[in-house]
Amino acid sequence: MALVNIRRFGSHATIILTSAARLLLWRYASTMNLLFDSFWRAAAYCLQPRVMLVSLMPLVIVISLTVGLGYLFWDAALDQVRYSMDSSSFAKSAWRWLEEVGLGQLKTVLAPLLVIFAVTPLIVLASLLMVAWLMTPAIVRLVAMRRFPGLQRQGAAASFLRSLAWSLGSSVAALLAIVVTIPLWLVPPLILVLPPLIWGWLAYRIMAFDALAEHASHDERVTLFARHRMPLLCMGVVCGFLGAAPSLVWASGALFAAAFVLLVPLAIWIYTLVFAFASLWFTHYCLYALQLLRSEAVPVAANVVETELPHLESP
């Protein structure tokens, strides 16, 4: 008898494990399908005139701020960096060694590069926040109107203020991570990995929250973040690596001073384009995931009604 019970238990356990494995595979396949479907839809939406027109506002603001602040503080920043380098005994030893090997001209290039590398995180952050605050609400309304017209808005009334607080808090955390990990950037492979990972995490935090701010309730947003954390984080990391491309433009602007005025707006335009694509990608993914989440609750409610009604006694 005990042997029979053990066999029954083993068969039931096998069935349960097989069902769980099938469920995991189904969820993985559906998640990957949603991931790539949202990617191509975002790429297609980037070519729409309305999206291109909306993207001009953050682009103009960030370029105006960068050019204006650069005009006011560029020379002072260069002088401060050069003074710090000249007053450092370590830097003097490095200059002598560079002159001995015939690379003394790098001294004139290093100061602009240091200023650019110090300013780049602020430029990236400004581009991301401008896209999130100025573009994402319009993008969410556009995608919701065309793909999800029946999706109810259950977000908080003060969604913009909540989004603003969430964005600023996440931005402070990302800047702290940048500062803490700067010593690790001296390791050649890590400088190519750490900044995109940090910016990808920030993009995931801001873009996913803003995509759901108007339509999802607090409980729905928490559920979606828990269920789709890894896909959303992967999307952010991909966008982070795409956003690393303008760093090459920044470096070229320091090496070719004559083209610096043209290359800097080009880099900012690439930042804005990448984050606009990220906003579309997260919006398509999150709104569809929200629609699926709400559709799951309907059959459950129907089953409850069907099972409970037969037990009711008529008076």
Image: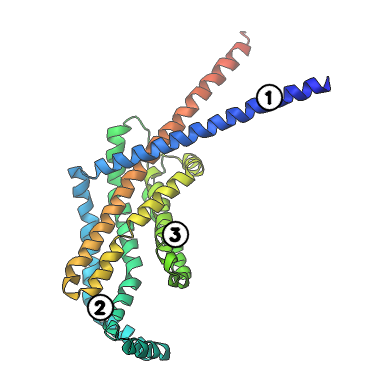
Residue 225 position, x and y percent, is: 48, 44
Residue 102 against residue 249 in the figure, above or below: below
Image quadrant where residue 196 sits: bottom left
Dot 2 or dot 3, earlier in sequence? 2
In the image, is 224 to the left or to the right of 164?
A: right
Spatial CA span between label 3 and label 1: 49 Å
- Nearer mark to the viewer, of 2 and 1: 1
The answer to which of 312 and 36 lies nearer the viewer is 36
| Dot 2 crowding, Cα within 10 Å, few <14, some 14–19, many 20+ | some
The answer to which of 240 and 148 lies nearer the viewer is 240
Residue type, mark 2 in image: Trp
Residue 219 position, x and y percent, is: 50, 40
Helix, strand or loop at mark 1:
helix
The answer to which of 264 and 15 lies nearer the viewer is 15
Dots 3, 1 in contact, CB < 8 A: no
What label does residue 74 carry, if any? 2
Residue ID for mark 1: 12
Dot 3 or dot 1, earlier in sequence? 1
Dots 2, 1 in contact, CB < 8 A: no
In the image, is 164 to the left or to the right of 104?
A: right
Examine the rendering and report whether any part of residue 5 can be seen. Answer: yes
Helix, strand or loop at mark 2:
helix
In the image, is 24 to the left or to the right of 216?
A: right
Residue type, mark 1 in image: His
Residue ID for mark 3: 169
Residue type, mark 3 in image: Gly
What label does residue 313 carry, if any? none
